[in-house]
Amino acid sequence: MKFEDYRIASEIKKNLVEAGFKKPTDIQFKAIPAILKGEDVLAIAQTGTGKTAAFAIPIVDVLNSRKVSSRAEGIKCVVMVPTRELAIQITGVFEKIAKHTKVKAFSVFGGVEQGPQIAQLEKGIDVLISTPGRMFDLVSQGHIKLNLVEMLVLDEADHMLDLGFIKDIQDLVKHLPKNRQTLFFSATINEKIKKLAYSLVKNAIRIQISPNNPVARNITHSVAFVGMDDKRFFLERVIKENPESKILVFVRTKVRAERVCSALDRMGLKSATLHGDKEQADRLTALNEFRSGKVKVLVATDISSRGIDIANVDYVINYDLPEQPENYVHRVGRTGRGTQKGLAVSFCSPEEKALLEEIEVYLDKPVEVVKITSQDYSETLDFTADTTYDLNALMKEVEDYEGSRKKKKKK
Ligand code: ADP
Ligand code: MG
């Protein structure tokens, strides 16, 4: 079935043609009719399979089909997301799908002045896309009214319902009318979170695509065993051997993101960082420069592992293994989006073997190992352009690393 055969507004169809969307993806094919019918949906589908449009298309259509826009009365749909970057991205998708319709989408998020956001809210909007923090500030100040909300979407649902956000979401639900439609979307979900999700809805239907393989099939992923102190030389090698490639590098902490970036700088390689300690404007600049290809290498923490849709990311490198096994799926899922293919490789040091095992248990299969011969290994170290590769720097890095491991264990 093609989008042109759907019973949705002709404006939306036109917008989909413009976006180059001809036929629905699997998750869109299954979720759109259920959402149009008004059902509660828990939808699990791999990364990069078009989950955003799977909820945005029917939401825009439902709101657009109203005879009279009641926008001025209040918000009709709330979409909750974990990061500001994702709020902006999803708003972009809504705007694309809602062009020339009666539906207006808008996002609010922290880290920027709230004045302009309040001004737009006062003009009236239909769909609000938000991170929890800023949303609650604006609700408590009376700038956001939720009494007319008919639809609630939790994108990256497992993450939104997990420790960090669950209280916010429960508070949010208290403000919403009982009679509403609730939609959960994610690439990963566990039993505990599933129960929690079901406790928030009346009759959820569950739609699951490829449940046995959480990693999208477009992604070839593998692991290389590399000493902690040698990782940067392997990163250097990958970057130098693929000068035209867009490479997204994930590290464990904000500090390590900056360190890897300066190590690359010493080697004459340009990169940008993205993590939670940066100003919002700098976060957006880094993301946009990576998006446009101005910067080919982005070093990021898990803050950007979820939902971010950047075309043509050739490689994801897990410079450090993720501590949450499901984040492995989300990180590698930043490549191989839509119909594109992607490559991901994880650098696993001896200290990280336990994390790798957890990931393999989570995936329910081993991750393919890239064999590095000892000759290859020493060639990689010889190949480096890092002239500060001396024992002191090495020792410092080892100490930092061990310090942070100890801290973690104490927790
Ligand atoms: P997910 O949320 O499942 O990770 P996204 O919603 O971010 O995925 O979509 C991934 C990419 O696929 C986006 O770049 C989007 O434009 C593209 N896409 C979505 N639906 C379609 C479609 N029906 N046809 C072609 N491309 C699509
Ligand atoms: Mg998504």
Image (spheres, grey):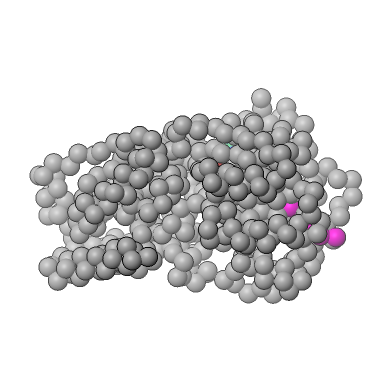
The quarter holding residue 39 reads top right
Q: x%, y% of residue 59?
A: 73, 44
| Residue, far right | 68
Left/right placement of residue 291 relative to residue 315 reads right
The quarter holding residue 298 reads bottom left
Q: x%, y% of residue 245?
A: 36, 47
Q: x%, y% of residue 163?
A: 53, 58
- Residue at position x 76%, y 57% in the image: 176
- Residue at position x 63%, y 74% in the image: 113
Depth check, front residue: 389 or 215: 215
On screen, 320 above or below 50? Answer: below
- Residue at position x 64%, y 31% in the image: 29
Task: Name the quadrant of the N terminus.
Answer: top right
Depth check, front residue: 74 or 44: 44
Q: Is residue 20 visible?
A: no
Q: x%, y% of residue 409?
A: 32, 62
- Residue at position x 36%, y 44% in the image: 359
On screen, 294 above or below 63? Answer: below
On screen, 391 above or below 371? Answer: below
Whether the magenta-drawn stretch holds residue 399 is answered as no
Depth check, front residue: 65 or 357: 357
Which SS does the magenta portion mostly show?
loop
On screen, 263 above or below 58? Answer: below
Whether the magenta-drawn stretch holds residue 74 is answered as yes
Q: Is residue 298 visible?
A: yes
Where does the magenta region start and end?
73-77
